[in-house]
Image (cartoon, coloured by chain):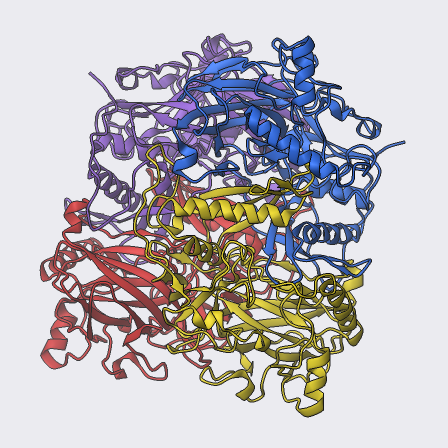
Chain colours: A purple, B red, C yellow, D blue
């Protein structure tokens, strides 16, 4: 086991760890540790909401979650010799739930998937599922099952939803400007178009008082992926993968968390992954001046690992960029196309007896693949969603006899 | 070898075949053959432009192509007993280039990938590559190489770009209405937002005179994917796959073509696939009332086959929904995100010595995977592009030494 | 399609082709063609018995087959510049059944698997299945089904059972000496321990008279794999694979045939593969002095291709080196261990309603994997047999309810 | 984390654990715990020699190891309701090295591979490598590297070498009889043909005095695989796999250990795996009367898991059943064939600069596949060894330029 450079007591809030983590992107959050290129180390993580969600059968906690606290990140970790323009090479050696513990915090033997209410977070299908729902998952080694989704059992493609390097002050200013410009196009929208910096709930390691308030006023919210990496929610950052992060500040300042036991491409329910706390083991190295050497100007590059769960049979759903209800055609809009693919999968699963919200939760958490299929055939983008058939304990394939409908229970709902 | 129900002489135009094929979607195009559920049969196909592109080193033919002729489809084939509401089960038993022939038509031992000019077709990166380019590929069994892309060699994931059932008159009217409404939002745009029905170039089997003109005036252009299947450009419709098409007219009326020796997800150069004529062997069956049984209201469902080329190491590029040049932020726009992932891959490949247009051609044709990664993390959609490292005969992975730049020639350009 | 350097008319015997092929290994069989390193070419092949087996429901033809005629090989093909000590690099670009033909010869739309009688050939389980049996397989693209094995459907891992270079006179003498020494330990055994040279049935291209008789007297039978390659029966010599053959004579003299639509590891019924005629497309090159450079003193090296059928769930059977009937323990004998694994699989399949001979035929032909698991744990070698579960159209996995027994017909038997 | 039913303090011998484990198969060893069908539990394990091998650069400990102590097993665990004739369904939920610890015992951050001396254990190539050698491996998440094998890095296919159910007294007597009969054919052989029961070194849980001595005199040594499972050394018993063990005594009495971080098929150096202590998490269930239902009379059945490391390119070596040095031909002997495949791989690797013993160690530990290729082509069995090319940090494939020879250090040797 490599040295722990950021440790977490899962019974306490991130604010009460020593040192605490942070929940904004800002170059002035002080590093908690410094490591050398070539070294291996462990980072322990809290679940992204800092433990607001419980192992129970009500989705009220999802409905009422305070998103100002999210994402609770571990770090930053400084890498000796890293300078702006370098590529930080990060190997994900291992990761998983909280080792050797069973308990009340997500990651202690269990995790959850949430559908967020339209009024508080939303999600990819929020116009179709505006209320809050939840599924609890139990971990069995690398396999997850849920009492809220009977008939389903799959191997998790465990990964961090969010890791990244610190932005420079200049890059941060650019983010804030462009996101505010977007918000300004429809400032009252629910859910909002983007989240601006906010003091409420800010945590910035050991910073206090004015320094902390300033990070709140300036620091980028952690929700989206950006030029520093960030909340990629790419399920393939699994064991054995290697990420090449752009370095924007001296020391690189690597931070992250938001560990997922599993997730489908798109993480469609917003916290569609199986959310958990846990640990992640890294090896780091540097490619000096790597951004210029390899033409990396914006986002990281990565190489997936070779132990992803192996499925070989898929049932695939297709969507095109048409609003079929309103018969409105969008121009090569892959978002609309993938949304339709998701909706088509939901309708299909309902014919087997799942509720729509169960199907939606499942597609967020299971190792589905979301593919951009055609984005040039005017006017319709075409996306497809690949559902592994082996995750069901019944035959999900279409047959002449029709679907095997059964009572498949229900997920946790809000009151 | 199964019975050939639509045969093609590759030395002649589709209009001169007996019977001819068609290049519009319309319910009144008469079937060329009738098959029974449970039967196997072969369909021969012309390349989608009906042979306008040559095996040479100039892209002028791509620049000047007449798109009114496309896509040249084989069929329609009626299936006994098929009625609206059924699912037509189509197994792709086998497909490939023109068997046993070497010649001048695409598919006779070779194929091509084209970047279409912004003035005549465009493509996914047309604002960055407004001119016409071409790469010729030679077939070696299931492997393709190109004199225009030295250093690259890969196994094709051979598939039909386009197959589908005939629309009903009602469905056709719906398509025409919603696409015209989109065109009307910016009717002078180049490239256009969509293509309306047009008499010029129409072919509708044996129809002539007024009947033919009417198909031209009413028939849907074949470019996009729609509720009948159509131009999916899903690379995973390969050998062994099974598609469940909605049936909209009695007899289902299955037609298609646009065979691809290989293609990357997105088919980003517009004719990004390696285009060819050839053959496709089908087995068909019916699920009576399958649309209602399985909740299929719009698009087909499919199951990929199990002989797709197996790659296990990928270099992956990420894009988010930001216009980085203009620092403009788009709201969860997967199209913008995937475009950025493509641009990032192009920039990367250029550091090894490829021209931008070579890289663009490569990403259209090679078996890359395009994934919808995160579409809920406001405001940034995140997409990723997986490039198999094994298709290069040099090491494409980032190293401390930097990229191995070399003279990698150039693709066919237009004069 | 590459140039055909050895063509076959499937309606005629190999002896009546022009030029004829050969059925012995001997350096003096004259080449039928000469190719250059770097070239691609096609070789057409007859089924290994030269068409003695028919598409019918009796196994009498298997029982009575004349094995002196086998294997009927195409070639030899000389490679310019090849000298003893080189490695001949052979890429298998493509291969398959007889293209575009349906007919009476194996490979014309169908193939067969045979269990050979103990009196005439034998097989891996010949003490348990001493009689002749047969299954006919129909080809559907890359998929095979059999009226003699209902409930089974799989993608073939198509490959040549037998290709190799010509032995030098010295090497040939060594083979004959060591194999005769083995025969001499039990010369009356049925089936025999090995097959010595024999004049009966010999074919040696255009050689006639004394030359032909000499090849009969000296030429090695084609049954086993040896230092020249030969009858490897390695199912992974499939599309896209590359073989490095040792060169023993000037020109290398590449010959072969015995094409298999599919085969399980071990080819346990002797002609356990799905036997067929067809075509194979090669690319050849040379590594000068490669044997010494890479320490190759005996057998070829190869790299499997990347389009093997992809199965991800297997039911695996284990065997150890014990004769359980006689409670006799063998010392680390992998042959005994694998035989037990096969027998255990047969017994398992019988509980679902297959006859023992059906199960045996299935294990010979389906894409099963045979693994050497432990060969050091004295006294028991341990081998395992991996049966893909997806090849059955019913659930083959063990459950608390027990196996789903059904009437599964019977294979072709002998009268 | 599931409940621990057998716990181990890695700083102490198995004899000093509370309760101790055992190192013989005998029905009278008392269970340490009882679990219910449907339950999940953890078993902690010592490395198989009970810690005789150190993390150092001398192979003297391997040379001098006391094999009477091996294998040190954890258990037995009784399963409620299990009766002879049932199948015990065992899911391997997770397993790994000693969690959260770095230390002196194998499994505490490191493991080793040993070549055993011919005088003390031997191995598959012991006639070619009669001395003792060792390689130490460091664990980096799921990846292993070795200072004794530079240039190599691979993902472990972590698994238990040995788990099984207790034999009945009758079955045990059968084993002892048949193995003694084998020993009697050459009682002075070095290494011996098999290992008879022996009192020296026996450990049998809490048994003492006469009871313990009797277990020593009667209990089967744990080296081979037998009808109860046992030392299968099947690398594919990895995470997610399911084993169906025959039950021979009431309660089934499941025991095992001998955890491997990785291993190649055959475990050719005898302790060719990367040996370690650690933990294993099980789920158990029963198929009542399953042996008869499914025709299981001898060995277990299993289904591999779906997270095995995914390699897609292999360099494959072939061997046939000929002693090439002595030109002696063996009859369809897969053991000889696989030995030749191993020797061919060793010779190949030597051309890149590895010593023969390094190559031998590598083939024992890396995720190589050993296949039974042809076992019917008289007189030569044919086996093949698949070496993943991606485990080397240099290009291992044959090229016209010849191998990239380098100084690749040396493994630990004995003095």
Query: What x and y, as percent, mark residue D188?
Result: 82, 36
Query: What x and y, as percent, mark residue C31?
Result: 66, 83
Residue A314 visible, this orientation: yes
Q: Does C286 sit above or below residue D227?
A: below
The N terminus of chain A lies in which quarter of the figure? top right
Q: Nearer the viewer, residue D148 or B25?
A: D148
Q: How many marks?
A: 0
Q: Nearer the viewer, residue B118 or B37?
A: B37
Query: What x and y, as percent, mark residue A164?
Result: 51, 30
A410 lies left or right of C60: left
Q: Residue at x 23, y 26 (%)?
A: A409
The image quadrant that residue D118 belongs to is top right
Q: Nearer the viewer, residue B213 or D121?
A: D121
B4 lies left or right of C28: left
Residue A172 visible, this orientation: no
Q: Residue at x 79, y 26 (%)?
A: D65
Q: Does D265 sit above or below residue D351?
A: above
Q: Nearer the viewer, residue D75 or B34?
A: D75
A181 lies left or right of D306: left
Q: Residue furthest right?
A: D415
C191 lies left or right of B70: right
The image quadrant that residue D217 belongs to is top right
The C terminus of chain A lies in which quarter of the figure? top left
Q: Does D162 sit above or below residue D397?
A: above
Query: What x and y, as percent, mark residue A115?
Result: 29, 26
């Amino acid at each position: 086991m490599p040295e722990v450079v950021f440790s977490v007591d899962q019974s306490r809030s991130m604010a009460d760890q020593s040192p605490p983590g942070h929940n904004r992107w800002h170059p002035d959050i002080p590093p908690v540790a410094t490591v050398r290129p070539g070294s291996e180390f462990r980072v322990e993580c809290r679940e992204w909401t800092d433990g607001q969600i419980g192992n129970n059968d009500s989705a009220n906690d999802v409905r009422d979650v305070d998103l100002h606290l999210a994402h609770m990140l571990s770090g930053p970790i400084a890498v000796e010799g890293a300078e702006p323009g370098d590529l930080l090479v990060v190997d994900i050696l291992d990761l998983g739930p909280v080792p050797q513990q069973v308990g009340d915090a997500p990651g202690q033997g269990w995790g959850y998937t949430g559908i967020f209410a339209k009024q508080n977070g939303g999600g990819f299908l929020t116009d179709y599922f505006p209320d809050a729902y939840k599924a609890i998952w139990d971990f069995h080694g690398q396999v997850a099952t849920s009492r809220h989704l009977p008939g389903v059992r799959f191997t998790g493609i465990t990964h961090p939803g969010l890791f990244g390097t610190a932005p420079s002050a200049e890059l941060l200013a650019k983010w804030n400007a462009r996101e505010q410009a977007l918000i300004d196009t429809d400032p009252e929208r629910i859910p909002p178009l983007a989240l601006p910096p906010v003091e409420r709930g800010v945590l910035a390691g050991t910073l206090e008082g004015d320094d902390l308030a300033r990070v709140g006023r300036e620091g980028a919210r952690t929700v989206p992926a950006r030029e520093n990496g960030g909340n990629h929610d790419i399920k393939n950052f699994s064991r054995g993968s290697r990420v090449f992060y752009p370095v924007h500040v001296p020391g690189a300042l690597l931070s992250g968390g938001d560990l997922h036991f599993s997730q489908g491409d798109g993480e469609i329910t917003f916290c569609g992954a199986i959310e958990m706390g846990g640990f992640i083991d890294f090896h780091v190295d540097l490619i000096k001046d790597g951004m210029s050497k390899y033409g990396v100007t914006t986002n990281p590059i990565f190489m997936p690992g070779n132990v992803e769960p192996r499925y070989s049979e898929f049932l695939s759903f297709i969507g095109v960029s048409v609003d079929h209800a309103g018969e409105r055609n969008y121009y090569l809009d892959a978002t609309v196309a993938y949304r339709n693919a998701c909706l088509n999968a939901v309708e299909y699963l309902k014919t087997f007896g799942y509720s729509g919200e169960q199907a939606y939760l499942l597609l967020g958490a299971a190792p589905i693949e979301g593919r951009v299929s055609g984005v040039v055939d005017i006017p319709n983008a075409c996306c497809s969603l690949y559902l592994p058939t082996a995750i069901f304990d019944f035959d999900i394939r279409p047959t002449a006899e029709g679907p095997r409908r059964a009572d498949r229970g229900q997920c946790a709902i809000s009151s």
